[in-house]
Image (spheres, rainbow, N blue to C red):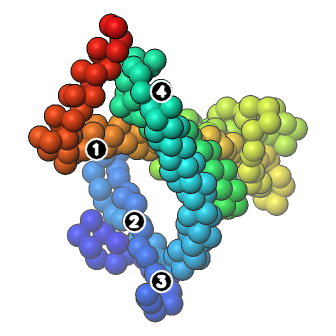
Amino acid sequence: IVSAQGGPLLAAPLARAGPGVALSGVAIRNDLGQTVAWVRLRYDDTGLRAAQQPLRHAMRLATWPALALVCGAIALLCAALVARLRRRPGPSPWPGGERALLAGAAAVLLACALAWLGWQAARIGQASLQPDQRAKAGALARSSAALITRALEVGVPADALAGLDAHAAALRARSPEIARLAWVAVDGHLLAGHLPEPGQPTVSAPVARAGAPVGNVVLALDTGVLARQLQATLLDMAFAGAVCLLMAQELLALGLGMRGARALAVADARHSRLAHA
């Protein structure tokens, strides 16, 4: 714990900082909102970085089926169009012709590939992050239980704790996977906060006063937070993919040049004549 000016106020002996040590800090503010001190925590993130490797490997494996689907479907569609033109070089029965059909098929395939990647990322990420989320929620529950224990020791009644909703909102602001916080008595009735919904995963920490159990702090986890974050990312990827499709069509038109443009104009005119014949 350091002062607002950076001077050390309180410190615990820590191991010497190495390459896997990261720093995290939280400000301590008074009633006026002024920063009076900082809590700085050094932790070893080697385990976190090691846990990312299986997730990256699993996502690479999940990318190949989506890529094979897009490439294979486009190749089959192109082959089918070429075969149809060779058998019957008439006007296209689809609105906009073959180019519109290819562009629409590419957009549909892009949406399918992104849906597959999103489902795989949510499934793999949830399976890998759930133990870490429960461990983090357990630490937050124990920290909240320690605060309640301190309030009980100074004489605050168990059913008259103030500021629990503000504390829960602060927890959710820093940890979106925390859905609800409840202060529950030993007999099970709610003292403050909000009880978890049925079927919602929870983590609890006991609270005791003078060695006698008083209640439990219960934290409910939101298992859909990762899916919502992935959904926003996939929407951005879909927009970028649509822009890339339009740019690819423009680059293809520029790459064909005047000769290719004349050839396309002749083919379109021929199709028009056949359609009106």
Local SS, label 3: loop
Local SS, label 1: helix
CB within 8 Å, label 3 to label 1: no
First along the sequence among labels 3 and 1:
3
Q: Which residue type does callout 3 highlight?
A: Gly
- Between the C-alphas of marks 3 and 4, the distance is 66 Å
123 vs 250, nearest the viewer: 250
Q: Which residue type does callout 4 highlight?
A: Arg
Q: What residue lies at 29% left-to-right and 15% top-to-bottom? A: 272
In-image side of 174 versus 243 (left or right): right
- Between the C-alphas of marks 4 and 1, the distance is 28 Å
Which mark is nearer the camera, 2 or 4?
Answer: 4
- Between the C-alphas of marks 3 and 1, the distance is 43 Å
Q: Which residue is mark 3?
A: 20
Local SS, label 4: loop
Q: Is residue 152 visible?
A: no
Q: Position of residue 2 (x, y in %)?
A: 35, 72
Q: Would you place residue 24 above or below residue 72 in this image?
A: below
Q: What residue lies at 56% left-to-right and 64% top-to-bottom? A: 60
Which mark is nearer the camera, 2 or 1?
Answer: 1
Q: Which mark is residue 24?
A: none
Locate residue 266: give its quadrant: top left
Query: Which quarter of the rendering shows the N terminus?
Result: bottom left
- Between the C-alphas of marks 2 and 3, the distance is 17 Å
Q: Is residue 45 visible?
A: yes
Q: Which residue is mark 4?
A: 88
Q: Which residue is mark 1?
A: 248
Query: Which residue is at the far bottom?
Result: 16
- Label 1 Cα neighbours within 10 Å, binned few <14 / some 14-19 / many ≥20: few
Q: Which residue is mark 2?
A: 25
